[in-house]
Amino acid sequence: MDYKNKIKELRNKMFLTQSEFAKELGVSIASIARWETGANEPTMKMKKKLNELFIKYKLVEE
């Protein structure tokens, strides 16, 4: 999965800034920025949480 684009798309669909999204997920703003640029990928635990949000916001199918 292309997390780089999906994460930014999810954040925008939730109408959140990187700071707000970071607080929502319990991570740093830098983590969000690195994920969105593709510099890093989320941990497996965070990928699971993100995948649940992707489904909730209809960015992927179940």
Image (cartoon, rainbow, N blue to C red):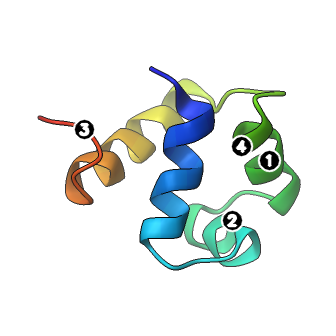
Which is nearer the N-term, disc 4 or disc 2?
2
4 or 3: tag closer to the N-terminus: 4
Position of the C terminus, as image quadrant, is top left
**Could you tell me which secondary element the residue under label 1 belongs to?**
helix
Q: Which mark is residue 60?
A: 3
Residue in the picture at 88% in, 53% down: 30
The residue under the point 78% across, 27% down is: 40
Q: Nearer the viewer, mark 1 or mark 3?
A: 3
In this rendering, the answer to whether 42 lies above or below 17 is above
Kindly identify the residue that appears in the image at 43 percent across and 45 percent down. Answer: 50
**Of pointers 1 and 2, the one earlier in the residue sequence:** 2
Which residue position holds label 4? 36
Q: How far, Cα to Cα, is label 1 from label 2? A: 8 Å
Mark 1 touches mark 2? (CB < 8 Å): yes
The label shown at residue 22 is 2
Q: For numbered disc 3, what is the local secondary structure?
A: loop
Left or right, 36 with respect to 51, comes to right
**Badge 4 vs badge 2, beta-carbon distance below 8 Å:** no
Residue under numbered circle 1? 31
